[in-house]
Amino acid sequence: MNPDQFWRKATDYYDIYHGKYRRAVLTDEELRETVADFIEDMMALMGEWYNSQENNDKEKE
């Protein structure tokens, strides 16, 4: 995954969750779930990025 792909995905996740937050009337529980889902998606993206960089490093060896 190159940096542009990473930032596009990160921006997409942000837009999705921030849009939901801004446009919907959420209960406190729904708000917590939305934030938790956002964090979960960002952690998965971080894992993707880390693994792709690790694979790139191995290919260079």
Image: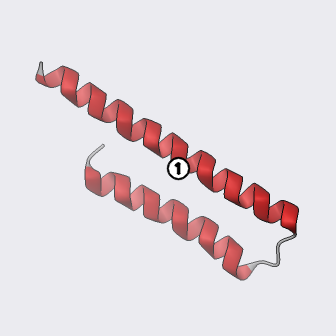
Colour mode of the rendering: secondary structure
Left or right of 13? Residue 10 is: left
Image location (x, y in percent) of residue 58:
21, 21
Left or right of 7? Residue 60 is: left
- Which residue is at a point 20% across and 27% down the rendered structure image? 57
Left or right of 32? Residue 37 is: left
Image location (x, y in percent) of residue 31:
78, 65
Q: Quadrant of the C terminus?
A: top left
Tag 1 residue: 42
- Which residue is at a point 37% across and 35% down the rendered structure image? 50
Number of marks in the image?
A: 1
- Which residue is at a point 27% across and 26% down the rendered structure image? 55
Estimate how packed mark 1 is, as few (under 14), some (14 to 19) or many (20 or more) residues with alpha carbons within 10 Å: some
As drawn, 11 above or below 19: above
Image location (x, y in percent) of residue 37:
67, 52
Element under label 1?
helix
As drawn, 31 above or below 42: below
Q: Quadrant of the N terminus?
A: top left
- Which residue is at a point 77% across and 56% down the rendered structure image? 33
Image location (x, y in percent) of residue 46:
44, 43
As drawn, 24 above or below 61: below
As drawn, 49 above or below 30: above
Left or right of 42? Residue 25 is: right
Dividing the picture into quadrants, the one containing residue 54 is: top left
Q: Amino acid at mark 1?
A: Met
Dividing the picture into quadrants, the one containing residue 15 is: bottom right
